Amino acid sequence: MAEACFTGDDGAMARVLIVDDDENFSALLSSMVKRAGHDATVVATIKEGMKALREPCEVVFLDIHLTDGNGLGILQDIRETPSSPEIIVMTGFDDSGAAELALKNGVWDYIRKPSSIKQMQLALLRALQYRKEKGCQAVPAALKMDGIIGKSPRVGACLNLVAKAAQGEANVLITGETGTGKELFALSIHNNSSRHSKSFVVVDCASLPQNLVESTLFGHKKGSFTGADRARDGLIKQADGGTLFLDEIGELPLSIQKSFLRVLQMRSFRPIGSDTEITSDFRLISATNRNLDQMVEEGQFREDLLFRIRTLRIDLPPLREHPEDIRELLVHYVARLCEQYGVGNKGFSPEFLAALKAHDWPGNVREFISTLERAISEAFHQPTLYPKHLPADIRIKLKRSELDMGTASELYRETAESIPALKTYRDEAIAAAEREYLERVIKTSQGKLREICRLSGLSRPRLYALLKKYNLTRQTVPS
């Protein structure tokens, strides 16, 4: 029987990487790939696999249990390589938890070994078809970035999801630590969508007074409660035709979550005190820095509401996970802040940049901007930013970290360039010991010259020579 050929319609050869320490299975899989008209590279370890991914690659067959680690631990690393290949995970073990983790990380398929060659062929065929169709899609117009800065793979992956979200109407949940820029990404989705000419309405769920949440969201009629001296549209209605951004949705009270779920389902609601249903055609984007799945388990958030708001999810990385973007952030915000303060644009020393990269930024980009504001205020008319201009708490934290790691300064790092010659090292050690000895003997003898000479065995001329060498003056040792 003739073998099926799984090249694309244009007959192009694809490069397939097989990462598996089972030699027999790898040979079988490699043979199948080659018969399909593609190039197969076989490696047995994670280290070899990541090295092979420096070259372009379309599909990776990845075993989980490898001699130098767990394949699931490098899924993100594989996706962030320049080719961002499709990943087909293989395992000889039954593990539903591993399958769930793999699929959540965007793998193409999860296959139990041993599987039929036909199943492997089909997985490869579909993955290559998908990549070909994805490559043929029209390139979207340049995104309106709305202040989003960064070219790292992590930020790039988030921007790809922004472009995807902007093309549709699906509800979006943006997650990330405080200060990662969740509102900026939400605004970018809105400004790149068909709703860009309508309102972008922000609701900070964490700051809404408990007794006014319902009125703020749904609006009210005049006289519907004490203080309601006039009718007012709620923020849901104000977002009609545009985008409703619920920031910190995890803080939305349970009592309101049920009502809001109905709004999402029906796109209609009654303002407080009204018998009439009104409608609002809005697109929902939510954001949170909390673990909503855990909140569901603890009964603090409705599971049915979570399903509704998380049609598409964008997870923003903390700044410490993409330090390669710090230089671009620095250049952008220094220029912007200097213009805002009416001072000339400033340069920065290499040490200033290194200090920013070394900090872990628990407050993320928000803390980064605030720190630059303080540094520019400190420098003001000086043309260059130095570590001296950083807040003291950051400098102290960095210095403690350096000392804990034994890297008090670049000068004394144990690199080939900084280790001194043996003679220099020995001379410095002897000098340090001699100076310490002299200080101790002077203290013990209470500075009496005759006693110093008796204890040390030094002649008076030799003692004077050493005192001069180590800058210990005669006043230190009275005659």
Image (cartoon, helix red, strand yellow):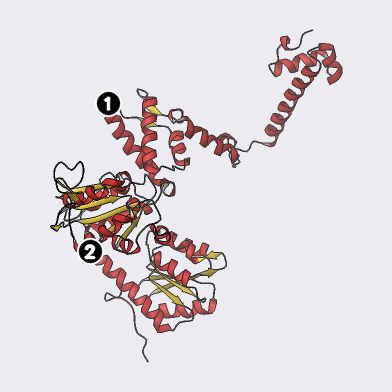
Label 2 SS: helix
Say if 212 sits above or below 350 in the image.
below
Location of residue 432 by image quarter: top right
**Which of 50 and 143 lies nearest the eye of the viewer?**
143
Q: Quadrant of the C terminus?
A: top right
Viewed as shown, does residue 91 lie left or right of 424? left
Task: Please report the residue visible at 27 percent of the width from the left and 55 percent of the height from the top.
Answer: 162
What is the three-letter code of the residue carrying label 2?
Answer: Gln
What is the three-letter code of the residue carrying label 1?
Answer: Gly
In front: mark 1 or mark 2?
2
Mark 1 vs mark 2, CA separation in Å: 50 Å
Give residue 255's position: percent from left, percent from top. Answer: 31, 55
**Residue under numbered circle 2:** 265
**Which of 265 and 283 lies nearest the eye of the viewer?**
265
Give residue 261's position: percent from left, percent from top. Answer: 26, 60
Give residue 382's position: percent from left, percent from top. Answer: 37, 23
Query: Could you tell me if residue 50 is visible in this image?
Result: yes
Task: Please report the residue visible at 52 percent of the width from the left and 33 percent of the height from the top.
Answer: 396
**Which of 139 and 114 lies nearest the eye of the viewer?**
114
The tag earlier along the polypeptide, 1 or 2, is 2
**Residue under numbered circle 1:** 342
